[in-house]
Image (tube, rainbow, N blue to C red):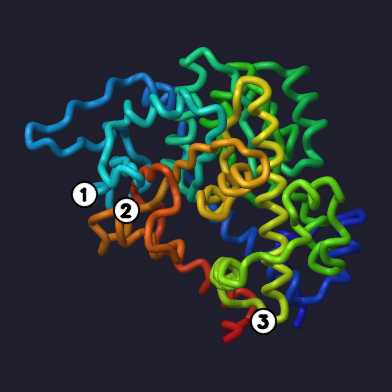
Amino acid sequence: MRTDFSTAPRSGASARVWANAPLALQVAIACYAARVRRLVALFVSVLGCVACTRGGNPAAPASGATAASARPWTSPLDRDHVLVGKIWDVAGQRFVEEGALDERVARAPLVVVGEQHDNADAHAVEAALLAVLVRAGRSPSLVAEMLDETEQPAIDKALAEHAGDVDGFARAVDWEHSGWPAWSLYRPVFAIAVAARLPIVAAGVERKRTMTLAHEGISALPEALVRQFELDQALPPRMQSELREEMRDTHCDMLPESMLDSMVLVQRLRDATLSAHLALGARAGGALLIAGNGHARSDRGVPALIAAHLGQRVLAVAVLEVRREWSTPAPYAALFGAKVLPFDYVWFIPRASDDDHCAELRAAHGMKPAR
């Protein structure tokens, strides 16, 4: 079967590696990219986002229930859901006002915000939280999963030569061809960073490295990273099993059984790379990481790695789309195969789409689930 994935590199060494990769590995890479590349024709202006960060927090109703965040929503589905705009304190098992979360964020040296990549409201929340740090007089680094480490020189050059030009930044990293959702969705977050002259740190793993890792195993990784995060050590059996299931699900059940352990290793590499870059921010004005919700998990994602190997605390905030059938926070833990939501706070937002992207991917490539 001929593969014609739009994520395939177009030229150079990466293209040669791609061409020689087995189909299953190409599917793995394509699935990862496809989950973050829903083309959404929505535009969120930075002015609207900044305005969201400046409004006061609504008072709690007389009944004692906590009010939802009063901000305009862009995503169209279930805006009237009972949880939309509400912020759940997982440890306290209670809803809190936006101002309470702002206070925690303002004090936290390191913050990770887990996102739904193609939801404009998720990025508006990220921008609001980054703005909280700026208003607190801090200069945190914005660490981004969406930017490959190899792009750091281009990022530094763009920030130096075109200060204040957020769209120039997007052109410098060739966002249009990155495989990530439309720049208009992410623009509010980076606009805050560019306007405040914050460091922007590329923390994503280059596709070429993930493919090499899947072929060659742990020997393909930098020795310092392996040693720092013990990537050469086997995970506890239960965690390995859970990660295998997560990889199966996030790759639309299209991977053969033989590929799952390799993809778990790739996930561990991504978490370790994000962790290394985020932790460096603690030496300066702190740092805020934007990444997929899986990386933001406090039980086995970036916060867990940094706590275990670097002894630093990371505040984990997840931004979750509501489900029509779930009107309380507890059921959402099932999305992560957990009994309790694996974050410090969860901010609920409307859904951007009900499209079944796994079905679309299978249909596009004439494939069926692996089991």
SS at circle 2? loop
Tell whether 268 sits left or right of 91: right
Amino acid found under the numbered disc labelled 2: Leu
Return the residue found at the far bottom. Answer: 371
Query: Element type at marker 1?
Result: loop
- Compared across the picture, whether 321 is left or right of 67 comes to right
**In which quarter of the view is residue 162 placed?**
top right
* Residue at the extreme top: 137
Of callouts 2 and 1, which one flags the residue occurring earlier in the amino acid sequence?
2
Q: Is residue 102 left or right of residue 286?
A: left
On residue 82, the disc is: 1
Dot 1 amino acid type: Val
Graded by Cα atoms within 10 Å as few (under 14), some (14 to 19) or many (20 or more), the crowding at tag 3 reads few
Describe the element under mark 3 as helix, strand or loop.
Answer: helix
Quadrant location, the C terminus: bottom right
Along the viewing direction, whichever of 173 and 262 lies nearer the viewer: 262
| For discs 3 and 1, the disc positioned in front in the rendered view | 3
Please give the name of the residue rendered at 55% of the width and 27% of the height, measured from the top-left corner: 109
